Amino acid sequence: MPILQYREAIRQALAEELARDPNVVVMGEEVGQFNGAYKVTEGLLDKFGPKRIVDTPISEAGFVGLGIGASMLGIRPVIELMFWSFYSVAFDQILNNAANVRYMSGGQINCPIVIRGPANGGTNVGATHSHTPENILASHPGVKVVVPATPYDAKGLLKSSIRDNDPVMFLENTILYGDKGEVPDDDYLIPLGKADTKREGTDLTIVTYGRAAILSLAAAGVLQQEHGFSAEVVDLRSIRPLDMDAVLASVRKTHRVLIVEEQKPFCGVGAQLAYMIQAEAFDELDAPIARLSTIDAPAIYSPPVEAEQLPNQQGILKAALGVLA
Amino acid sequence: MTKKTSATTDNPAETGTATQGHAGAAVNARLSAADKVELYRKMMRIRRFEERSLRAYQAKKIGGFLHLYIGQEAVAVGCCSLMGKDDHVITAYRDHGHAIAVGMELNPLMAELYGKATGCSKGKGGSMHFFDPSRNFWGGHGIVGGQVPLGTGLAYALKYRGLKGACMTFMGDGAVNQGAVHEAYNLAALWELPVIFVVENNGYSMGTSQARSSAGELGQRAASYGMAWGVCDGHDLYGVRAFMAEYLDLAREKSRPSVVEIRTYRYRGHSVADPDNTYRSKAEVEEYRKTKDPIQVFQRALLEERVLDEASVARIDAEARVEADLAADFAEASPFPDLADIQKDVYWEADNPAERRSAGRLFFT
């Protein structure tokens, strides 16, 4: 099976959907001539031309809103945000218009738009460029939120997102862009809202997503080798819709839960998960649900310290041992 | 006198054109007597609908806000009467006039105000959020200026699909200072999108006059984006049609955007919650009502043309009042949405379970 980088897998998904559906348009800052700020869209302009691959000015409220308007009339825009951090200047368009217009029109309108780009810390770019807004996005009914961890997931989930008739927020990760993995070059789809148990285990469930899933897998390996504990790693892949059945099945198997998220703790995805697990599987728990989040402050610049602000392999290991104690 | 910019040049120049005499403009000369009566009737239906809705609001039948369009009717009716099959309309929260102008029926509109399941948005949108995509009407938007990028996107879709249409993107004079509006202007000009940004200038952004809120000429801001622009009076329906026809042609035929400022006036407060006694005088309102009421102005023109007579004027008014009353009766008799309806119309997939491709929970407790 071909081995692709995460960014190449996304590019392949875009290329396949552009070829399949003439209404798909890729739009964003530097996606065309510049070949993508992170080279995700490299080569697409040459292949599909300027009608399909559209360079925009730095004007997020403008082009995100334009994309939403175009989607109401049947275009399927895939809008790239150079960083998801810039969603804040397009917040009104995303969360008042894309999220609400179906509802406020009594179901007469739908917005088949995808907004995608990286949303992560860990690259020493300071607080303005390190936001992870999956919790904020997911708290608006009407949008879907997807956070892929691997090249395989990224391709299959992005293709499903582009074909989805609801607005999908697709959160990637600059640190993962160079990660490699097996990616079939056929037309496979991964449904949104289906978690993937990336490691089977019996002693502890780690519920996680995005890059934190990759880190959790590494920590689970050490946990097994050095401490003899078997951890199951459930990668949510999609925050909304949410595969709660997969989470609960794992909890019923291991009876101990650690949630790992690259998120601030207050009202984060983990807070919602912890509430739901205790509400629906209280009797299954042998220990309080533990959570490892980003240390609660704006993203610090200082490179070695930022590495400690975020969940990392050592931190996950320590938190896991805490739940197992 | 109004200032007017030729829609056919890149470099706007004020030419000065009188508002009088627009009846003879090509777009008006081809109207039949019956067409003219229908335009008049439409303005009257908007007026009586809103007056009836105000009484319902005062009787506490309607919640939230109610932003009345009374005094501005010739703008929506004039502009929307020029729509072809691929022309589209989007507007802000003062949207009753546009909804009726594009042909929506009064019953679902009044029912929407009453929060009823028979409303045009099933009671989920309210006064500010009327929609009817089947009539190319895309709302009804509550955030000042927020609809302007959407309208630009509708125009983008028209151009992308090779359709010869335009999107009239309405906003109030209070919207022109919002960043999203300027971002939309730039994209429209840069990509030559068939959009007409229609600034309905009623002089007040809520309680703040234009002089206290906006620097410079509102329409002229288009010039710095290289867009055509112009200004016209909004109380003369013939004038609005003659003026807008040029800009619609420019959009449809040459895919060129423009900004038009239509000067109008509202008789009521910003919303009916506005006591309307802090920022303008009663005399100012009365002066407009006496001299520039758009229904009176058009009525006089049609009486002079002998298209209407006193009897038909009275009949049209009576019919509009009855229609508005019947709409209120319909709204009153209609059921409210069920609690189960709260979570419908959120996700396309949830509403179309047979075609759902995703798994997992979409809703949470």
Image: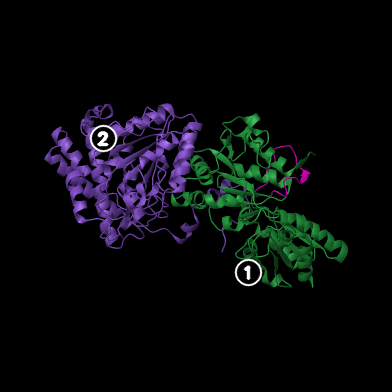
Chain colours: A green, B purple
Where is the N terminus of chain A found, in terms of image quarters? top right
The residue identified by callout 1 is A279
Farthest residue, direction left: B310
Q: Is residue A178 magenta?
A: yes
Q: Say whether residue A184 is visible.
A: yes
**Three-letter code for the amino acid on which mark 1 is drawn:** Ala
Give me the residue at 41% from left, 40% from top.
B134
Badge 2 sits on which subunit? B
Q: Mark number for residue A183?
A: none
Tag nearer the camera, 1 or 2 = 2
User: Badge 2 is on which residue?
Assistant: B239
- Please tell me whether mark 1 sits on a helix, a strand or a loop: helix
Image-quadrant location for residue A223: bottom right
Q: Type of residue at label 2?
A: Gly
Residue B169, quarter of the rendered image: top left
Q: Which residues are magenta?
A: A174-191
**Where does residue A262 sit, x and y in percent of width and height?**
68, 58
Please say if B134 is above or below B282: above
Q: Secondary structure at mark 2?
A: helix
Relative horizontal placement of residue A25, taking residue A201 as reference (left or right): left
Q: Is residue B272 left or right of residue B292?
A: right
Residue B360 seen from this side = no
Distance in Å between CA atoms under marks 1 and 2: 65 Å
Q: Residue B228's x, y, as percent?
A: 39, 33
Magenta region, mostly helix, strand or loop? loop
Give yes or no for residue A233 being in the magenta stretch. no
Residue under mark 1: which chain is it in? A
